Image (tube, helix red, strand yellow):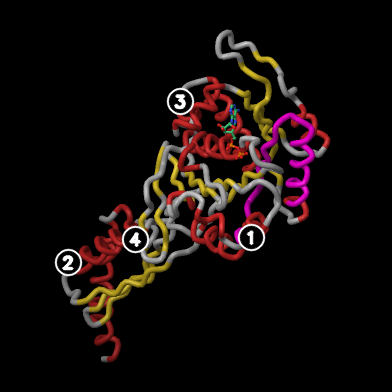
Amino acid sequence: MASASRVPICRTVSEPITALEAALERIPDAAGRASAVRIKGGVASLVLEVGGLSAAGRTALEQSVREALEAVEGVSEVRIVLTAEKTERTIIAVGSGKGGVGKSTVAANLAVALARAGRRVGLVDADIYGPSQPRIMGNSAKPELAGKQIVPTSSFGVRMLSIGQLVAPGSALAWRGPMAASALGQLIEGDWGDTEILVVDLPPGTGDIQLSLIQKWKPAGAVIVSTPQDLALIDATRAIDLFRKMDVPLLGLVENMSGYACPHCGEVSDPFGSGGAEAAAKVMAIPFLGRVPLTLTLRRASDEGVPPAAGESEEAEVFAAIARRLLEGLSG
Ligand code: ADP
């Protein structure tokens, strides 16, 4: 008697579940995201994993799951619990010992080259006191807020956030260390959605922002930009030491402004020398990622907001090769 009464109860429980699962299967974006699907007394419930989706993507997915389940016979209410496992994001810090060596130019073009290599890339302009990425990336769009998070804006296939998009030029200069560190936090913890690699353009030197980034967000590695001159290299060594002391893997050194490529004949001369950074990388046992020549194209491109890495020039190939070496280093 008891077993006879159990059978129909099992059926009424399992049949709607099959229908719920079938309804979920018809939503491609929900694949692999739904778990703990249950129904009791007409109330359907499930857990939806929304990690890696943008705020808009989350809302859209939740909405389509809700509508699909409400349409299932026997369902009077749908309860959805959203969970977001933190997306594993690879943070790459781009640093230099001193200003003016082309760190921001390299960071921007590296980000574009990584995006062209098929990665989902974000660029954080952590140079709170002297943001230059809006100009280099031609992206001064005002970011919007999604809840408490800032939503990056895109150009050349790269999502970006810079304090330069948020406050008037020069106004961040008066900020004290903690305020600058909190601004950095807002940028790094923006709504980056499914971004895989976050390139962080650090301020020059070895100050509070660098320490904050390393301690709080633990970059997967650092890229150091230096010119071939000795002075820049001595400064670069200080930046390298900081990453070493804090156990951040050094992914490589980029030699920028390495030789001058004549815009008329293409011949490369070496007004500041070249190869200094490559030799230093060898001595310090750091991978050498490549040489970026000093060219008028690169200088003009920065002013015009069109990173050469997005085009088809020789410079684009230089950055593509640097990005390839970096990716090899990351996967190795
Ligand atoms: P940093 O971030 O190290 O202060 P920037 O990237 O802002 O340096 O570059 C400083 C200046 O040098 C900018 O005007 C930029 O356009 C120029 N620059 C950077 N790299 C090159 C290069 N390889 N060839 C020509 N000009 C360059």
Q: Secondary structure at mark 1?
A: helix
**Which range of residues does the magenta coloring cover?**
215-242
Q: Which of the numbered marks, if any, corresponds to residue 58?
A: 4
Q: Which residue is mark 1?
A: 212
Residue 81 % position (x, y)? 36, 72
Q: CA distance from mark 4 to mark 1?
A: 30 Å
What is the residue that sits farthest to the top in this orientation? 265
Q: Secondary structure at mark 4?
A: helix
Q: Is residue 142 left or right of residue 232?
A: left
Residue 135 % position (x, y)? 46, 39
Residue at 23%, 82% (x, y): give it: 41
Mark 1 surroundings: few (<14), some (14-19) or many (≥20) residues within 10 A: some
Q: Is residue 332 left or right of residue 128?
A: right
Q: CA distance from mark 4 to mark 2?
A: 20 Å
Q: Which residue is mark 2?
A: 71
Look at label 4 and name its amino acid: Arg
Q: CA distance from mark 1 to mark 3?
A: 34 Å
Q: Earlier in the sequence, mark 4 or mark 3?
A: 4
Q: CA distance from mark 4 to mark 3?
A: 34 Å
Q: Which residue is mark 3?
A: 311
Residue at 42%, 51% (x, y): give it: 152
* For discs 1 and 3, the disc positioned in front in the rendered view: 1
